[in-house]
Amino acid sequence: MWRCFCSGRRVLCALVLILGSSTVSSCTPLSVFDLLVYRQTSLVVRSDLRVLNSIEDWFQQFCARSGCRLVWLKQQAYPMQLALVEGFSNAVRHAHKSLPADTEIKIDLALWDDRIEIRIWDHGEPFDPNTLKEPAPGTLRLGGYGWFLLRRLADQAEYQRCRQGGNCLWLVKHHTSLATSRSEVHR
C-alpha cells in the first residue's frame, strides 16, 4: 500500500491502490489503517508572524474537540503545538523571506487513532535540511536550532519539494505506546 507525501495525491494513491496498480509516483509505503482518518482540517493564512496566536488557537481547538475520544492526544498536543509554531515561523522567516506578506501558507492537520500529523505548505525556494550541521551541545548561537528542535518534538519530520511546486514540512507524533511497540517490532 502507498501513502502520498504531497497533499491532494492521497486520494489518487488510494484510488490507484483500490484499482490494483502497484506503483504510484511520489508515494511511500502505508498500511490499510492509514487510510482511516479520524479527523482532519486545514487553515490558510498569510505569511505573517502576527497570525501565530490564531494558528495556536485553531490547533488547540482541534485537539480539544478530539481529546475526549483520544486521551493520548492531551499528552502529545503541546509538543506538536511547539512544532507547528516553529515550522510556521521557519516558513515565514526563511522560505517566504523574499515573498510578499500576502503569500499564503496552508496548514493541514490530520488525526488518526494512533498519531497526529501536521503539514505546512510554503511557496519558497527548496531547502535541504540534511545540509544543516547540528549545533554542538553546550554551544550558543543566534538561530539555527529550528530543524533540530522539530526533529526532537515530532517522531517524524520531513521537508520535501513537491512536483506541483512549493514545499511541505510533514510532522508526525505517534501515540507513545504504539510508537514504542512499533520500534520494538522492527528491531
Image (cartoon, rainbow, N blue to C red):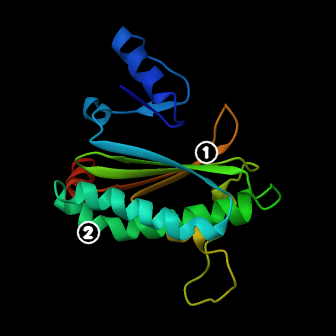
How many discs mark residues in the rendered view?
2
Residue 69's label in the rendered image is none
Residue at 34%, 56% (x, y): give it.
Answer: 62
Residue 160's label in the rendered image is 1
Which quadrant holds the N terminus? top left
Q: Which of 187 and 163 lies nearest the eye of the viewer? A: 163
Q: Could you tell me if residue 147 is visible in this image?
A: no
Quarter of image, res 95:
bottom right
Q: For the view shown, which residue lies furthest in the right direction?
A: 98
Query: Where does residue 154 sit, x and y in percent of width and height?
Result: 42, 62
Please give the residue where the numbered disc 2 appears in the rendered image: 75
Query: Where does residue 183 sit, x and y in percent of width and height?
Result: 27, 53
**Few, some or many residues within 10 Å of mark 1 (<14, 14–19, 20+):** some
Query: Where does residue 180 sit, x and y in percent of width and height?
Result: 23, 58
Q: Give the spatial CA distance, label 2 vs label 1.
A: 28 Å
Q: For the view shown, which residue lies furthest in the top direction?
A: 19
Label 2 or label 1, whichever comes before in sequence order:
2
Q: Which of 18 and 101 lies nearest the eye of the viewer? A: 101
Secondary element at image label 1: strand
Look at label 2 and name its amino acid: Gln
Look at label 1 and name its amino acid: Gln
Q: Is residue 127 left or right of residue 87?
A: right
Residue at 62%, 89% (x, y): give it.
Answer: 139
Q: Is residue 115 left or right of residue 139?
A: left
Q: Is residue 115 left or right of residue 125?
A: left
**Few, some or many residues within 10 Å of mark 2 (<14, 14–19, 20+):** few
